[in-house]
Amino acid sequence: MISPTLDTRRLTCFIAVAETLHFRKAAEQLRLAQPALSQQIRKLEEELGCQLLKRDRRRVELTPAGQALLEAGRRALVHLSHAAEAAQRTAREQQSLLRVGFVNPAAFALVPEVLRGLRAEHPEVHLMLREAGSATLLEEVRLGQLDVAFARGPVIAPGVLIDTLRREPLVLVLPSGHRLARKTRVPLEQLADEPFIGFARDTAPSLHDAMMGMCLEAGFSPTFVAEAVEWFTMVSLVAAGLGCAILPESVRTFSREGAVYRAVAGTPRHVDLVIARAPTPPA
């Protein structure tokens, strides 16, 4: 998947080069100087820690990593475009004030890019931002208290239009001194006897259910020693050594001394990031 912290400008530059396989043509297409374009590609490769393009004086070729990023990057830019269009559509309908709700991890993954584009396209629109749990946000959209909300799915919300923007894998959060912290991928069944910190189901039902499902598939029912409303509270409790947690990958951008993030061995479960809005009333 595309990292939630990946610079979309660099991704756009890479896709232009990957599709043309020509730095000069890509630079002309993007209206950039060729050295500036080359610098963006180098920074992207440094950020990802892998070579994306093989280039010499005669030709440019994609590496396997570059081919994978091209396919995933195209999808990511489409998702971002859809999110921006949905927000802008609501802004046109609500000319003076746009009330936007979001779950906290979404603030790292997508919301800043969407709101930045919205402010550039519609400087006349005033934004009112609200952070809350998914269940609360969806109910406020249904009641007309919010115009649009970024929430966690899958969800069933009668009276609310839902579009899925992206899928995000779940990762483990372990105390840095945990016996499995040195592994890059952790078999979940090895945590069967460990205490867990989870979301309260009435606050984040999709995340709660996904975590329960992962543990049950691994052959055990987790023992919860604490339930939290906010993800950073969960990470802090993990850092304090109270237990383990399972959270969306975008939370990796939050660095907390005493806690480490690790992938789950096997095929991980995903949660959706969705955008919710009220149906447009008939004219």
Image: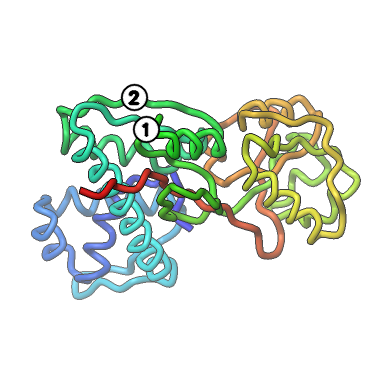
Q: Position of residue 227 (x, y in %)?
A: 74, 31
In-image side of 274 versus 169 (left or right): left
Question: Which quadrant of the structure image shows residue 259?
Answer: top right
Q: Measuring 15% from the left and 27% from the top, which residue is drawn there?
A: 124
Quick check: marks 1 and 2 in contact, CB under 8 Å? yes
In-image side of 71 versus 26 (left or right): right
Determine the CA span between mark 1 and mark 2: 6 Å
Q: Is residue 215 above or below residue 241?
A: below
Question: Which quadrant of the structure image shows residue 12?
Answer: bottom left
Out of 45 and 114, give the one closest to the viewer: 114
Q: Is residue 199 above or below residue 29?
A: above
Q: Which mark is residue 128?
A: 2
The tag earlier along the polypeptide, 1 or 2, is 1
Q: Residue furthest right?
A: 193
Query: Tag 2, which secondary structure?
Result: strand
Q: Residue furthest front?
A: 283
Residue highlighted by disc 1: 100
Q: Position of residue 51 (x, y in %)?
A: 40, 61
Q: Measuring 27% from the left and 67% from the top, which residue is drawn there?
A: 18
For badge 1, the amino acid type reads Val
The residue carrying pointer 2 sits among few (fewer than 14), some (14 to 19) or many (20 or more) residues within 10 Å by Cα, namely few
For badge 2, the amino acid type reads Met
Q: Measuring 23% from the left and 54% from the top, which residue is drawn there?
A: 38
Q: Which mark is residue 273?
A: none
Q: How is the image coloured?
A: rainbow
The residue carrying pointer 1 sits among few (fewer than 14), some (14 to 19) or many (20 or more) residues within 10 Å by Cα, namely many
